[in-house]
């Protein structure tokens, strides 16, 4: 809890409350000095909220799991093929 200090905030209300009801952004002190237009601050806050929703979506979580798994399987297959070629069990195709 902040006591005795005035803080400026940006509150975004969600058009679709399925994901979140409100997002609250605390503005930095030096952001107040830059005299950034309100529209620019709101646009940046919306971009941050959208990026968070995309990162935490179930589709992104599956991709975060699938890419390393497929990479490990491909590496294991290549290592197995190399070992089989070296040992002579599998003849070289050329």
Image (cartoon, grey):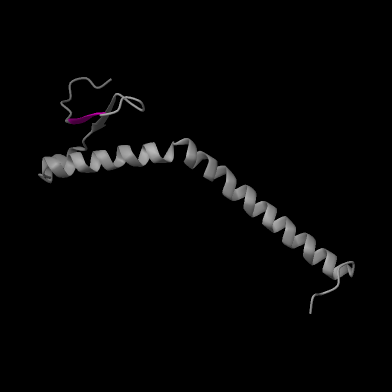
- Please state which of residues 30 and 52 is positioned toward the viewer in this rendering: 52
Give the image quarter of residue 80: bottom right
Of 56 and 6, nearer the camera is: 56
Q: How many numbered marks have been drawn onto this rendered protein structure? A: 0
**Above or below: residue 48 compared with residue 15:** below
Image location (x, y in percent) of residue 44: 23, 43
From the top left corner, tell me how far across and down residue 58 is, in percent: 48, 36
Q: Is residue 30 visible?
A: no
Kindly identify the residue that appears in the image at 78 percent across and 66 percent down: 82
Image quadrant where residue 19 sits = top left
Residue drawn at 24 percent across, 22 percent down: 2
Q: Main secondary structure of the magenta part?
A: strand
Q: Which part of the image, by quadrant, shows the C terminus?
A: bottom right
Residue 3 position within the rendered picture, expressed as x and y whole percent measured from the top left: 22, 19
* 11 in relation to 61, above or below: above
Give the extent of the magenta segment: 9-14
**In the figure, 12 relative to 82: above or below?**
above
Task: Mark yes or no: residue 52 visible.
Answer: yes
- Residue extending farthest bottom: 94
| 80 within the magenta span | no
Position of residue 61 measured from the top left corner of the image (x, y, whole percent): 51, 39
Query: Where the N terminus falls, by quadrant?
Result: top left
Examine the structure image and report whether residue 10 is included in the region drawn in magenta. yes
Image-quadrant location for residue 89 = bottom right
Residue for point 16% across, 30% down: 8
């Amino acid at each position: 809890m902040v006591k005795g200090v005035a803080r400026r905030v940006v509150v975004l209300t969600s058009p679709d409350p399925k994901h979140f009801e409100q997002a609250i952004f605390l503005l930095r002190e030096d952001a107040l000095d830059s005299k950034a237009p309100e529209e620019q601050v709101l646009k940046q806050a919306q971009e941050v909220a959208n990026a968070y929703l995309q990162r935490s979506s179930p589709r992104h979580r599956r991709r975060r799991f699938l890419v390393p798994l497929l990479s490990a399987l491909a590496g294991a297959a290549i290592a197995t093929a190399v070992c089989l070629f070296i040992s002579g069990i599998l003849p070289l195709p050329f």
